[in-house]
Image (cartoon, rainbow, N blue to C red):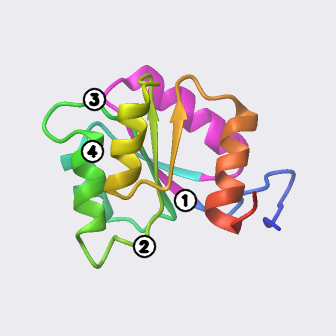
Amino acid sequence: MAKQVDGKIWAGKSVLVVDDYQAVRKTIKELFASMGLLVTEAVNGVEALDQLTKVSVDLVISDLVMAEMDGFELTEALRNNPKYRSIPVVILSTHADYKYIFRALRLGADDYLIKPPTAEMVSTVLARVFNHEW
């Protein structure tokens, strides 16, 4: 079971939120912070890889469609790098078509959420990713 501190079930865990829209990052950051997660942000895959050289995270949440390096490319880069391949990756996208979902999973994503995610959806994915709970 997840460690709960002051009502925040994911206290001590950290996440890198990768999305090119500041409003989306802000919303996701607030949701994750309310669950106790420490949040780092990046605007695309290139910046995410740069952030990972500076901070250690327990999870990467990434949009798909971004300039410079999209979520597919970021997922593939993380899976191909021994230093980062064990970090769980969850895609968070407006694309609900199975082709996007299957491609992300084939590239190594651990899960896929459709925007906008509910707190319940996020909690379920976090429990699965961190605690292997179904």
User: What is the distance, in whole Å, between disc 1 and disc 4 at their CAs?
Assistant: 21 Å
Residue where numbered disc 3 is placed: 65
> Does residue 107 show up?
yes
Mark seen at residue 14: 1
Mark seen at residue 72: 4
The quarter holding residue 42 reads top left
User: Which callout, 1 or 3, points to the residue nearer the camera?
Assistant: 3
Residue type at numbered disc 1: Ser
User: What is the distance, in whole Å, between disc 2 and disc 4 at their CAs?
Assistant: 16 Å
- Residues at discs 2 and 4 in contact (Cβ within 8 Å): no
Query: Quick check: is 30 in the magenta stretch?
Result: yes
User: What is the distance, in whole Å, between disc 3 and disc 4 at their CAs?
Assistant: 9 Å
**Who comes first in sequence, dot 2 or dot 4?**
4
Find the magenta span and give its range: 14-37
Residue type at numbered disc 4: Phe
Q: Quadrant of the C terminus?
A: bottom right
Q: Residue shown at 83%/61% (left/top)?
A: 4
Circle 2 crowding by C-alpha within 10 Å: few under 14, some 14–19, many from 20: few
In this view, the residue in front, 104 or 34, is 104
